[in-house]
Image (spheres, rainbow, N blue to C red):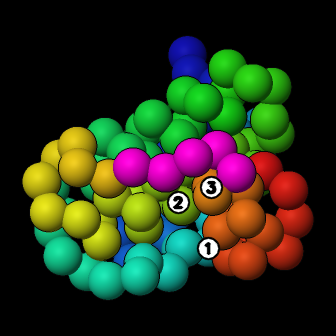
């Protein structure tokens, strides 16, 4: 048994199925589309961060979405860098709330 099933749809966002609900997660807009390699891993890292920090599914999915958008704008799998404050500001711009 799983708590949630998550379906990613690339540039079309993702959907989280949990507790009998279907939560549509909007895509975060990438600054550029350079290399998709590692985007799934970045998305997963965002999911883990949200879950480990007690965020609800909507916020967790948006964190994951933004992580994927940040990654796709850089070549390679681990060449993107940002501070937590940079992430927080971009999250606010993308989704209009706090992460």
Q: Earlier in the sequence, mark 1 or mark 2?
A: 1
Does the stretch in magenta take in 82? yes
44 w.r.t. 65: above or below: above
Instruction: Check disc 1 and report its element: helix, strand or loop.
Output: loop
Q: Quadrant of residue 26?
A: bottom right
Is residue 31 visible from the viewing direction of this image?
A: yes
The crowd level at tag 2 (other Cα within 10 Å; few <14, some 14-19, many 20+) is many
Give the side of residue 1 with respect to residue 62, left or right: left
Q: Magenta span covers which residues?
A: 81-85
Is residue 8 visible from the viewing direction of this image?
A: no
Q: Are marks 1 and 2 in contact (CB under 8 Å)?
A: yes
Question: Residue reaching furthest right?
Answer: 97
Instruction: Check disc 2 and report its element: helix, strand or loop.
Output: helix
The picture places residue 18, in percent across and down from the top left corner, at: 70, 40
The picture places residue 2, in percent across and down from the top left corner, at: 56, 22
Q: Are marks 3 and 2 in contact (CB under 8 Å)?
A: no
Q: Earlier in the sequence, mark 1 or mark 3?
A: 1
Q: Which numbered marker is on residue 40?
A: none
Q: Which numbered marker is on residue 87?
A: 3
Does the stretch in magenta take in 24? no
Which mark lies nearer to you, 1 or 2? 2
Residue at 57%, 46% in the rendered image: 83
Q: CA distance from mark 1 to mark 3?
A: 17 Å
Q: Which residue is mark 2?
A: 65
Q: Quadrant of the N terminus?
A: top right
Residue at 54%, 61% in the rendered image: 66
Q: Which residue is mark 1?
A: 26
Q: Quadrant of residue 92?
A: bottom right
Q: CA distance from mark 1 to mark 2?
A: 8 Å
Residue at 55%, 37% in the rendered image: 47
Which mark lies nearer to you, 1 or 3? 3
Give the side of residue 3 with respect to residue 39, left or right: right
């Amino acid at each position: 048994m799983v708590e949630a099933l998550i379906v990613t749809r690339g540039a079309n966002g993702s959907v989280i199925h949990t507790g009998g609900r279907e939560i549509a997660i909007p895509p975060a807009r990438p600054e550029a589309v350079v290399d998709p390699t590692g985007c799934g891993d970045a998305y997963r890292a965002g999911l883990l961060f949200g879950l480990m920090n007690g965020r609800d599914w909507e916020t967790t999915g948006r964190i994951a979405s933004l992580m994927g958008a940040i990654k796709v704008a850089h070549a390679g799998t681990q060449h993107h860098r940002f501070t937590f404050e940079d992430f927080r500001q971009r999250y606010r711009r993308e989704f209009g709330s706090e992460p």
